[in-house]
Image: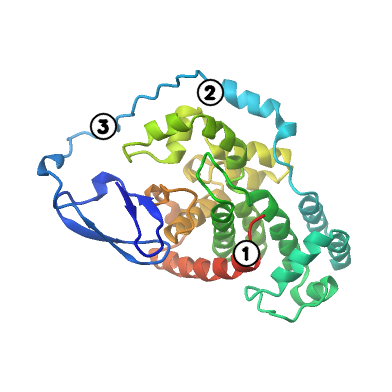
Amino acid sequence: MKVECSNCNKEYKIPDEKLPVGKKCAVQCPACKNRIVIDLRSQPKQKQSLQPSKPVEKEKPTVSYAKKRPSGMSLKYGILRSLGDLPAMPHIVQKAQDIIANPDSNLNELSRLIEIEQAIATRVLKLANSSYYGLSGKVFSVQHASVLLGYKTLGELITVAGISSLMGRNLKGYDLSSEDLWRHSIAVAVGSRIIASRKDAEFGNEAFFAGLVHDAGKLVLDQHIYERKDDFETFMGNGQHTFLSAEKEILGFDHSEIAFELCQKWQIPSNQSVAVQFHHYPSKSQGNELAYILHMADCIAMMNGYGAGQDSMMYQMEEGTLEFLALQDKDVDDIQSQILESVEKMSQEMPAG
């Protein structure tokens, strides 16, 4: 069932089996916390049926594939053969990552890198002066920012400024505006760092970068999804399937698999690449801790209303995630509130594009 918040006008899909047939209920809008009242009293009672004794798979709607477009390995190989046409990691981000990874590098190298790229320098200074970093109006130059913020944070600023142009795009196939995609990317990056930093601050920096690019595969698949829009609408028409399952059914693979290939092209370290690949199903990652962190941050971001599509409310945290990360339900609430505060501050000062 599709519901719309009367306060912020965001739409969400709620699986019918999660709603009480013939009753009146209410849910909270993840975006603005407004109470959405759903009145099901007018629906016929016969829709409510006993659960079968054995679980059965949900019936998949028939998808016509009328135009016989390539799918499965044929489509995937076609995409991989065109690696040169895939989105490139902004040069300045790649260079900044190399400098940070070099133990013999220093602040001056990062500062010089920014100063060469005036567009990036402007964005870095704007973000450095944001309330998120607590230096509102105090930073006047790149050199000044490097002294006040330090080496790692300056590298983070470059990464955010550079990747905002990569991830800040309108995706017609996914029905995502550039702002929605970017805010979701920021939310997952911030959430991943919060979770990872509970164990190790350095791990937090690694998690932040992986969070920023975790949905990069959507940049590649968007045109293919748009070409198959009717098939996706048919498959998801009954409200029982997520966009992720639709990708698997119609394309033969999902955006996380393509994101892994992008990470390989961008020469992103293996731990981060694998985490991106399995961020929707970390139990298949052979114990990659970062995959669990990205997955948890992704789910919390969608709980906060920073979703990556209208079906965001249908995604659930994989069983065993909290146990694997040695966290509890109370930690989720704490992380959720931190993400809300951080994303609002950062996204206001660093818009998409």
Tell me where residue 351 sits by quadrant.
Answer: bottom right
- Residue that carries the numbered disc 3 in the rendered image: 56
Colour basis? rainbow
Residue type, mark 1 in image: Asp
How crowded pointer 2 is (Cα within 10 Å; few <14, some 14-19, many 20+) is rated as: some
**N-terminal-most mark, 1 or 3:** 3
**Gap between marks 3 and 2 measured at Cα:** 27 Å
In this view of the protein, can residue 198 be seen by the observer? no
Residue 238 can be seen, yes or no: yes
Q: In this view, does 261 lie above or below 96?
A: above
Q: Disc 1, disc 3: CB below 8 Å?
A: no
217 to 24, vertically: above or below:
above
Q: Find disc 1 in the rendering and name its residue.
A: 200
User: Are the residues tagged 1 and 2 within 8 Å (C-beta)?
Assistant: no
Query: Hey, which quadrant is residue 220 in on the image?
Result: top right
CA distance for labels 1 and 2: 42 Å
Hey, which quadrant is residue 112 in on the image?
A: bottom right
| Residue that label 2 marks | 71
Residue placed at 62% from the left, 64% from the top?
200
Q: Where is residue 95 shown, x and y percent of the image?
A: 82, 52
Q: Please state which of residues 89 and 181 is positioned toward the viewer in this rendering.
A: 181
Q: Nearer the viewer, mark 3 or mark 2?
A: 2
Report the amino acid beneath label 3: Val
Q: Is residue 330 above or below residue 278?
A: below
Please tell me which of labels 1 and 2 falls first in the chain.
Answer: 2
The answer to whether 312 appears left or right of 158 in the picture is left
Residue 144 placed where, x, y %? Answer: 82, 76
